[in-house]
Image: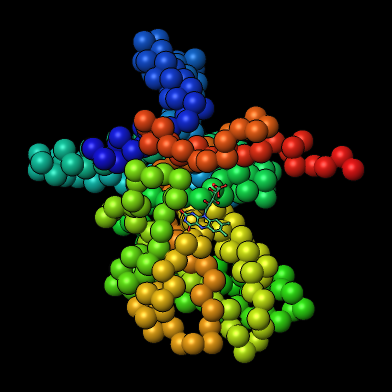
Amino acid sequence: MFWIKNTINKMQIGQWILFAVCLLTGVAAFLIGISDNIPGIILLVVSISSAFGVWVWNWHYPRKFWILLGAAVLSFPVGVILHNLFYALGIGASEYKILAAVLSYLEVGFFIIAVLFAGPAALTALIGGIFVSWKGISGIAETNRSYRRFIQSHPISDRDMLGFVNLARLSASGANLQPLKYILSNTEEKNQKIFPTLSWAGYLKEWSGPVEGEKPSAYIILLGDEALGNSFQYDAGIASQSILLGAAERGLGGCLIGSIKRDALREALSIPEGFEILLVIALGKPGEKVVVEDIAPEGDIKYWRDENGIHHVPKRGVEELILDL
Ligand SMILES: Cc1cc2nc3c(=O)[nH]c(=O)nc-3n(C[C@H](O)[C@H](O)[C@H](O)COP(=O)(O)O)c2cc1C
């Protein structure tokens, strides 16, 4: 139930439109008939493609679309072969009623996959993949919001964590000193040590932070190695942004936390002296919807949450940021 409510809450207007198209064309297809009826079949293909569109709407990572495309293209021949195989097995097993019924369900199931799902899935994957690739960095920058509620059960792999540090490693560094060090945490045990040392969303006075089930799945702690430098803030900002963009590209999200009980965190993880605690990046699969909106000049910059749990982030307009000097 929570999953359904959460999904509906997060659905955007475009998804609702596709959902309506899916229902209308689906009903129309069955009303005019889909058996040997080309208009009916076209309507059904549009309906199923729209359903796939609702599903992939929030995918921002091209690789996911290419995987779906590969699976859709493969599912056609595999579906046809398995359909014929189960048909033949069903004839052979006609004496055994239950087995014959199971085989005939499988036969029909693989027919539906091959004929009805492979095409719409491939079409959706192709359109979505091209669209997401074309949006590129600006699409990822839009997706890259500060998320503070996550699907805690969604794990973040060691491989992803190393990938994030690699993005930070490739980022610019003043005088190329590269003085940053990182502590990684993607286990429940270590996460539990970090969580109590962080402060969440100072403007949301009535909210004390994510509850169990919506806490981050991972953290990256940025440290300044005092043996290598003494000014870390610019490097930390750039490295953090690289990590967050990388997370957004993988369909994950995060939040920079600068408000840290530093002594408590140092003690909890036995961080030695000589490493300045700069920032913590909380990471996970976003479990909330965040929208950016324009603020009028002199408007309030405080982010807020509406009655549907949607987090609103007011941003100054571009024209306000540029000084005409
Ligand atoms: C340096 C820095 C420190 C931050 N510290 C915190 C923090 O301690 N707690 C928190 O909930 N958010 C923190 N944030 C997130 C900001 O509140 C967030 O970036 C801002 O509200 C704008 O939202 P957006 O990232 O979605 O554009 C921090 C952001 C930055 C850049």
Judge from the rendering whether residue 193 lies leftward or rightward of residue 233; answer left or right: left
- Quarter in which the N terminus is drawn: top left
The colour scheme applied to this rendered structure is rainbow
**In which quarter of the view is residue 84 placed?**
top left
Residue shown at 51%/27% (left/top)?
Answer: 14
The picture places residue 31, in percent across and down from the top left corner, at 36, 10
- Count up the numbered dots: 0
Query: From this viewpoint, which residue is outermost toward the front?
Result: 298
Foreground pick, 124 / 89: 124
Query: From this viewpoint, which residue is outermost toward the right?
Result: 325
Residue shown at 37%/31% (left/top)?
Answer: 308
Residue shown at 44%/73% (left/top)?
Answer: 262
Q: Is residue 101 above or below residue 211?
A: above
Foreground pick, 43 / 321: 321
The picture places residue 32, in percent across and down from the top left corner, at 40, 10
Asked if residue 239 can be seen in this view, the reply is no
Asked if residue 228 can be seen in this view, the reply is yes
The picture places residue 73, in percent across and down from the top left corner, at 51, 45
**In which quarter of the view is residue 100 placed?**
top left
Foreground pick, 112 / 166: 166
**In which quarter of the view is residue 104 placed?**
top left
The picture places residue 51, in percent across and down from the top left corner, at 43, 30
Judge from the rendering whether residue 110 lies leftward or rightward of residue 51; answer left or right: left
